[in-house]
C-alpha cells in the first residue's frame, strides 16, 4: 500500500476512458428530453462516451476540438461528462461549469468532495449539489499499445457522480 507522502512520485494519467456501464448506471436519472453536451472531449479522439450516451437514447452534442474552458455549443440543456483526473484542469473546468450555470452530472473521484477547492468553487451554490453513489467501484478503460481497450479492475479510487441543479429525488442517489 502506498503512503500519501509518496504520492508526489506517482504519475497522473488523463487518458483513461469511461466505460459504457458508468453511463448505464445513471441512464434512468438523465432526462431523455434534454440535449446533452459531453463537454470534456478536447483531443479525446479515442473516447466513446458520446457514442455510449447516444446508444442509450440521448441526444448528444460534442466536439473534440472544443475547449470547455473557452466555448460551448449553441444549444444544450445539460452537461454529462467525465472531466480529466488532473486537479489543476478539473478545478478550472468546475469553475467554468458553475459560471455557465447549467445542470450537470460529472463522473469524478470521490475524494474530490473532501477538498478545499470544492467548497471554494461551489461557495454560494452548495445547495444545488447532489452526489450519486454507485453500488460498486467503476473501473476505467485504457488503450494498449496495440490499440486494444482493456478494463482492468485496478482502479485505486472510488467514483461518484457530482450533480449540479439536477433536483434528483433522494431515493435515487444510492444506486443498486
Image (cartoon, helix red, strand yellow):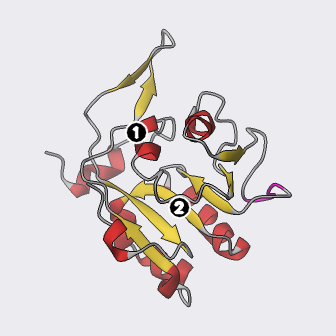
The vertical placement of 26 against 57, above or below, is: below
Q: Position of residue 5 (x, y in %)?
A: 24, 57
Q: Residue extending furthest right?
A: 74
How crowded is the residue under tag 2: few (<14 C-alpha within 10 Å), some, or many (20+)?
many
Judging by the rendered image, the residue that carries numbered circle 1 is: 21
Numbered disc 2: secondary structure:
strand
Q: Is residue 47 left or right of residue 172?
A: right
Q: In this view of the protein, which residue sits in the foreground, 6 or 88?
A: 88
Q: Which residue is mark 2?
A: 105
Magenta residues: mostly which secondary structure?
loop
Q: Which residues are magenta?
A: 69-73
Up-down relation of residue 135 to residue 41 (above or below): below
Is residue 117 at all visible to an observer of this figure?
no
Q: Residue at x 38, y 22 (%)?
A: 150
Mark 1 and mark 2 lie on one chain; the one further toward the N terminus is 1
Give the image location of residue 85, x and y in percent: 47, 50
Amino acid at each position: 500500500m502506498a503512503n500519501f507522502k509518496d504520492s508526489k512520485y506517482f504519475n497522473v494519467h488523463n487518458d483513461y476512458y469511461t466505460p459504457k456501464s458508468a453511463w448505464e448506471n445513471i441512464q434512468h436519472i438523465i432526462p431523455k428530453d434534454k440535449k446533452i453536451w459531453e463537454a470534456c472531449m478536447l483531443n479525446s479522439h479515442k473516447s466513446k462516451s458520446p457514442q455510449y450516451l447516444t446508444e442509450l437514447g440521448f441526444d448528444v452534442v460534442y466536439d473534440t476540438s472544443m475547449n470547455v474552458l473557452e466555448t460551448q455549443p449553441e444549444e444544450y440543456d445539460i452537461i454529462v461528462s467525465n472531466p480529466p483526473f488532473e486537479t489543476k484542469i478539473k478545478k478550472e473546468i468546475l469553475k467554468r461549469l458553475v459560471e455557465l450555470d447549467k445542470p450537470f452530472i460529472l463522473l469524478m473521484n470521490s475524494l474530490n468532495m473532501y477538498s478545499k477547492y470544492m467548497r471554494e468553487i461551489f461557495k454560494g451554490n452548495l445547495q444545488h449539489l447532489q452526489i450519486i453513489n454507485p453500488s460498486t467501484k467503476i473501473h476505467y478503460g485504457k488503450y494498449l499499445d496495440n490499440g486494444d481497450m482493456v478494463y482492468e479492475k485496478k482502479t485505486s479510487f472510488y467514483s461518484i457522480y457530482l450533480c449540479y441543479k439536477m433536483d434528483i429525488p433522494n431515493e435515487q442517489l444510492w444506486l443498486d
